Amino acid sequence: MSCRRLYAALVLALLPSLGSAATTERLTDEQVKKLIQDIDIGYDTWKKGLEKENLDDAVITSAERTIRVKSFLEDFEKAIDGVKDRFKPDYAASPEVLALLRRGSDVELHNRRQGRTPSSEWPALATKLGTLAAAYGVGWPVQSMNVQASRLNDGELAARVEQVAKGAKALQGETEKAARANKSIDKAARESLKRSIQGFEQKAKDVQARLKEDRPASVEVGQLLSQARAIKETQGKLSLPATASWQGIDAGLEALARSFDMARS
């Protein structure tokens, strides 16, 4: 077989596995910080475009209110600065981000209602704002006053995963004690369940390390959620009672599933 044909065969063989492994990765803190910087730059570019057309001195009058564009731009810039100042590893600045997204949504919705085609600077900025909205679990543009931005930054999420790992360690002891008390469960079943919980604990530590190091973790989070389901199913089959450790584990897993947009069930 020629090198070209061999390469083609390898590609065809790998395609199914590559496709099935594809996941949507959560933005890390560093990626969000870069996105916020890009929004800041995009805002400056958009504002300069308005100034060249003297649109920054315009007054927009509607049935609801009158808006001075210059004042609006000042508030927009303050909203960006608020996000830049408050965004930290242990604080996602969700209220500040939502305030910024509302400013951007005012522009986006105004353009849509007026049927106006903005200059290229605005769509470029709006795309970045839409990406930021997705990172905080918010639709773009923001149209409801009841919307709440929701993100746990890497440090916050890593603390939740640490809770999962500690819960898994406690779960091992609780499960072992309950399994030994149940005479219908043989040693092989006990050992198998023990290994599953140990693997679960190790996977939680792996996810925690990835979050702290700003590394991709979607595949590992999916594996962690699957392991938790498998352990619960095994406990049910063995008629083992739910233990107190699951409360902390489930809270951490719920935060992970929400952050990575994955289903728990």
Image (cartoon, rainbow, N blue to C red):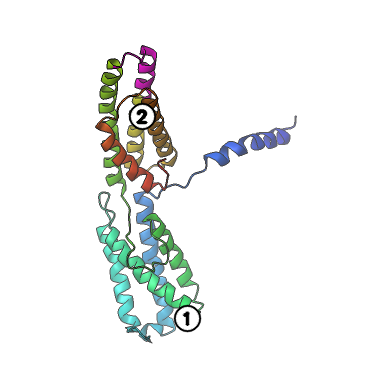
Magenta region's main secondary structure? helix
Q: Nearer the viewer, residue 160 or 31?
A: 160
Highlighted range, magenta? 182-196
| Above or below for 156 versus 162 | below
Q: Position of residue 27 (x, y in %)?
A: 40, 50
| Above or below for 118 versus 31 | below
Q: Nearer the viewer, residue 42 or 200?
A: 200
Q: Position of residue 5 (x, y in %)?
A: 73, 35
Please identify the quarter of the rendering in which residue 203 is found: top left
Q: Amino acid at mark 2?
A: Phe
Q: Nearer the viewer, residue 215 or 230?
A: 230
Q: Residue 189: tell me if it is visible.
A: yes
In the rendered image, which residue does mark 2 sit on? 200
Query: Which residue is at a point 43% across and 72% down the rendered structure image?
Result: 108
The circle on residue 57 is none
SS type, badge 2: helix
On the rendered structure, is 71 left or right of 42? left
Q: Residue 213: tell me if it is visible.
A: no
In the rendered image, which residue does mark 1 sit on? 114
SS type, badge 1: helix
- Neighbour tally class for label 2: few under 14, some 14-19, many 20 plus, Cα within 10 Å: many
Q: Is residue 183 magenta?
A: yes
Please identify the quarter of the rendering in which residue 167 is found: top left
Q: Amino acid at mark 1?
A: Gln
Q: Position of residue 193 (x, y in %)?
A: 37, 21
- Neighbour tally class for label 1: few under 14, some 14-19, many 20 plus, Cα within 10 Å: few
Q: Position of residue 54 (x, y in %)?
A: 41, 85
